[in-house]
Amino acid sequence: MAIILDDLGSDPQAAEAIFALRERLTVSVLPFHAHSTEIAEEAKQHGFEVMLHMPMQAVGNELPEPRQLHGEMTQAEVAQELGAMLANVPAASGVNNHEGSQATADARLMTELMPLLKQRSLYFIDSRTTAATVAFEAAQRAGLRCGFRNVPFLDDVEDVGAIRKQLELAIQGAQEKGRAIAIGHPHKETLEALREMLPKAEARGVHLVFVSELLKQ
């Protein structure tokens, strides 16, 4: 089972709380936040796997990031934005989408993005923020190492009991499917539930790994 913790970049204390867990967690860092570069570099130093949490346009576009991929961009503009984001989140070995319910359903945009990731030897994880996503299929066609979230989000409800139940679903998903990719966020409730549940998962034969260890090309 791999667990990706999204939305890092603004809160160094949240990042330090993740580092203190000393687990094989994958952290996904939003670009252009106050501490994006610092957190990405520290995560790598602490032995964590680092991803770029790439902002993409959502349906309705509520509270978008200042810079994001959207359907009106040319491939040259996508390449330029990708380069700037990766420069701001150093040591990223892969990418997953932040929001993106509109962008990941845009076949042209996803077809233009994936070869650019391939050129940089990055992998791609589809966060599956919409059932209409075509991102994973586009990544497969481009020959990327890729995967997708295949169990429910861990912490749509920021309550330890609720997150514990979602983690149980992820553990069961890993047991049934052989592998699970889960996504959560650096809420204190999420970290508390992880601290409690991960040893229990290990005892049940579900091993925590970095997300790249679950991917096939």
Image: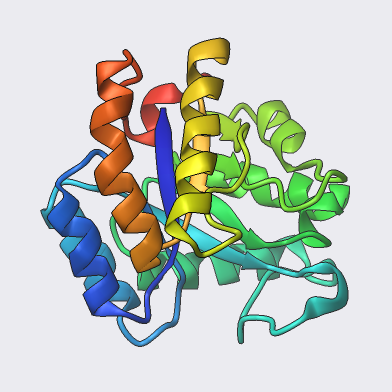
In the picture provided, is 91 more to the left or to the right than 19?
Answer: right
Furthest residue in direction front, as rendered: 161
Q: Is residue 74 left or right of residue 157?
A: right
Above or below, 63 against 128 in this view is below
The C terminus: image quadrant: top right
Image quadrant of residue 52?
bottom left
Number of marks in picture: 0
Q: Residue at x 46, y 26 (%)?
A: 171
Residue 62 located left or right of residue 25: right
* Direction from residue 127 to residue 215 in the image, left or right: left
Task: From the top left corner, tell me how far across and down residue 172 is, in percent.
Answer: 52, 21
Q: Quadrant of residue 201?
A: top left
Residue 164 vs 81, above or below: the answer is above
User: Residue 65: horizontal and vertical position, in percent?
Assistant: 61, 81
Q: Find residue 77 and report its horizontal and vertical position in percent.
A: 68, 71
* Residue 200 visible in the snapshot: yes
